[in-house]
Image (cartoon, helix red, strand yellow):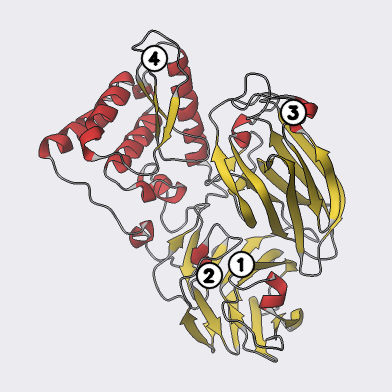
Amino acid sequence: MALSNSSRLLRLFTYIGEKYFEGQTQKLHEYDIATEVFGRSKSTFNPGEDAIVRVEAHRLRKKLKEYYEGEGKDHPVQVSLPAGSYVPAFIHRHIDTGCPVEPQLEVAVSPPPKRRRWAYVAAACAALLMAALIGRIEYRHRQSEPAKSLSTSAATVPPIVVTGPFAQLPLHILAGDYGKPQVDAAGMLWQPDTYAHNGGNWTGPADSVLRTSDPLLFEHWRNGDFSYEIPLKPGVYELHLYFLDVRSRATSPSTFSVTANGHPLLSGFDIYGDAGALNTADERIFRDISPGSDGMLHLSFATLTGTAELNAISILPGLAHKQLPIRIVAQPNSYTDHDGNLWSPDNYYLGGYVSAKSDDVTGTEDPDLYSGERYGNFSYAIPVVPGDSYTLTLHFAERYFGQNAPGGGGVGSRVFRVLCNGQILLNNFDIYKQAGSFHALSETFHGLKASPQGKLNITFQAIVNNATVSAIEVTDESH
């Protein structure tokens, strides 16, 4: 395999190698790769509409897999790009004894010690004939200069400039934040506070925020009586509001109201009561949002028994009378399936653990969808529009128990139940009994309703060993 036959794959692999060995793995995400490798605009790139990074990463993974299954199968050190990640990993094959030993995967979450770098890059990159990458690393090795790290990738992101009379969509605003734009786990660009009037702003304590993979959305607040006037083209939009309560309430709820163009969205809203706990991310979704006759979306936040507060706003092109689908994959990065659907990184969870696997899953056109899992006892609180009915699809693969699987065993080795808002969806559920090992399995449920807080609360309870899930999909059944 010669990656030099593809200039895109060569640039991508070179960039990944350079950032890894320079200690800049924080730049190995979709936004920086799109803008620095593939020349996408820093002010307009939208990973929801442009899948170039995910497509080329998928091609690179496929090329690497083909190479190591063929002429490179005997290389003692093999490089891979785990599904759902743009950080390289190295597989060490212990073949010097002549006895077959299962490869061990070292996930490269941080660069190896300096003394080991040359051994990694010499074996991995020489095997792939990556002359450009080898040359750069050889030069740095000869210079013996330590790698320089960047504090955050956001420091290199220029501010968004809204051109014309209308806001650029999708629009993501960090309320009360007057710093630089930031990039979330899905590669979406969030701009500092804009279009706001009145109220104050403050920065809260840096405590851990539950039920979110993007704590950056909850670092700042706009509070008091305030409003937003956002210029939008005529059309239908979906509005997402993000809240976080970090201050305990002594007795009575702290409530406020939210309106859009004078129509109530939330009345007597209490963040703590809605989220269920302090330091817990809360997201509310509203469909069929349109600008007024003046071309503006007027959002008003008014104090009732407590101070109105807001952390972030998202405005997306919407569907009439129907919520946009929510697709989540239990991986740290987004994923695009064979139909072009974007699956967001793991989010809305509480409890459990995540792991990544390298074995292929059969019975699906999207095996990479099953390359990660959340396992243990855990739950998801997925925001939806109250009043609608929803279809929930859960995606599973048994990759630990069963014949030829690491944990051995068979039927009964993993048994668990799944509930949605207290209703049992699956009981005594055994993935291996249904599908065997390393085979995709999906379970679909219709007619699910939101909780009063606008959530599908999906709970995974272990009965024997750990509950598990690889991906979750929620679609609105409205017509």
Answer yes or no: do the residues labelled 4 and 2 have beta carbons within 8 Å?
Answer: no
Three-letter residue code for mark 3: Tyr
Q: Which residue, given by chain and number where applicable, does mark 3 sit on? A: 432
Q: Which mark is residue 218?
A: 2
Determine the image quadrant of residue 350: bottom right
Residue extending furthest left? Answer: 143
Q: In this view, does 168 lie above or below 199?
A: above
Q: Is mark 3 on a helix, strand or loop?
A: helix
Quadrant assignment for the C terminus:
bottom right
Answer yes or no: do the residues labelled 2 and 1 have beta carbons within 8 Å?
Answer: yes
Q: Which residue, given by chain and number where applicable, does mark 1 sit on? A: 281
Query: Which residue is found at the position 40% from the left and 66% from the top?
Result: 159
Residue 194 appears left or right of 252: left
Answer yes or no: do the residues labelled 1 and 3 have beta carbons within 8 Å?
Answer: no
Residue extending furthest top? Answer: 98
Q: Which of 146 and 249 is in front in this view?
A: 249
Query: Which residue is found at the position 79% from the left and 45% from the top?
Result: 417
Tell me, yes or no, if residue 76 can be seen here: yes
Q: Which mark is residue 365?
A: none
- Crowdedness near tag 4: few (<14), some (14–19) or many (≥20) residues, C-alpha within 10 Å: some
